[in-house]
Image (spheres, rainbow, N blue to C red):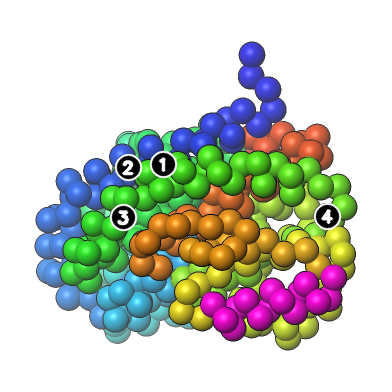
Amino acid sequence: MESAGDHTRNEILTQPAAWAAALEVMQAQAEALRAFYRRGGYDAALFTGCGSTYYLSLAAAALFQELAGAPARGVPASEIWLYPRSAYLAGRKTLLVAVSRSGETTETLRACEAFRASGGDVLTLSCYPGRALTALGALNLVFPAAQEESVAQTRAFTTLYLATVALGALWSGRADLLDELNRLPVLGQSLINHCQSLAHTLGGDASLDRFYFLGAGPRYGLACELSLKMKEMSLSHSEPFHFLEFRHGPKSMLTPGALVVGLLSEGNRAREAAVLDDARALGARVLALAERDADVVFHSALSEAARNVLYLPAGQLLAFERARRSGLDPDRPNQLEAVVILKGR
């Protein structure tokens, strides 16, 4: 007999298998994707989605710009649909990468239609074959292993994000990065196994009443997503910030009931860790996630571009455990639906 949260828990725990399946899809499509990008001669890339996949777009665009050396932005699909002149430059050869778990979200469909009508090319990533989005791209990638029963995205988010990392590796000629990605399923399973106890302890701590997720560069979008998971699943006060921006006002909200979750990089670790030290000095609790010397340690020996996805499972489990402690059903968050379809459009 199913109990509250069973679907979400299963989807979090089975992410590594979905990652492996997604990487197989990317490998099968590698030559077609390389040829598509080469043929397009793109000057810029625009990543889009709604809700979780908008935050995925922020992370994907930041990483793509680092890898490919081409301008990239992450923009909500509604902005491309309703405010195209502020979303992208019509005179620039731009590729739109549209990401949607369901393939049916109205704003994403309208964004793709409007972008195509302006003469632009579209690539789509989704989880369900035969949905409306899969007919709107010049290429349409589908990752069925990431499909979910829950409203809040976990497995779908990480799998689709990993696919965008593989896109960046393919389009920037980074064969070394593609090789690294193939190690993630095993690493991810080990990480999930080791962080469940810590997530259960922190998630069940009734003294915590607010959560702040800090990330920078390609990890800011991931911090946004983890903050959203905390809001959706547990109805807790939760906000994301860029690491150093946290000092510019937000730190005034710190109390002994605050948990600050830091997605620490390697390249700027000292500066980012100093922000966490400030939070501790002001009485807040801190949860640091990093490759080494942290509360949640990856021990991956991968490049930052490859291991970014490893920041996500611990935060997802934390939100799940917080929801369970609060007597909520993580599978069915309050006032939310799995797909937003606008009537009248």
- The residue beneath circle 1 is 16
Give me the C-alpha separation between circle 3 and circle 2.
9 Å
- The residue beneath circle 3 is 181
Give me the C-alpha separation between circle 2 and circle 1.
6 Å
Q: Amino acid at mark 3?
A: Leu
- From this view, report whether residue 63 is shown above or below residue 222: below
Residue sitting at 37 percent across and 61 percent down? 301
Give me the C-alpha separation between circle 4 and circle 2.
35 Å
Dominant secondary structure of the residues highlighted in magenta in the image? helix
Residue sitting at 69 percent across and 52 percent down? 230
Q: Amino acid at mark 2?
A: Ala
Q: Which region shows up in magenta?
A: 269-283
Q: Amino acid at mark 1?
A: Pro
Q: Is residue 136 visible?
A: no
- The residue beneath circle 2 is 20
Q: Position of residue 147 (x, y in %)?
A: 44, 36
First in sequence, mark 4 or 1: give its number.
1
Q: Amino acid at mark 4?
A: Leu
Q: Position of residue 154 (x, y in %)?
A: 53, 45
Residue sitting at 28 percent across and 50 percent down? 182
Give me the C-alpha separation between circle 4 and circle 1.
30 Å
Q: Position of residue 229 (x, y in %)?
A: 64, 51
10 Å crowding of disc 4: few (<14), some (14-19), many (20+): some
Which image quadrant for residue 93? bottom left
Give me the C-alpha separation between circle 4 and circle 3.
35 Å
First in sequence, mark 1 or 3: give its number.
1
Mark 2: which secondary structure? Answer: helix
- The residue beneath circle 4 is 208
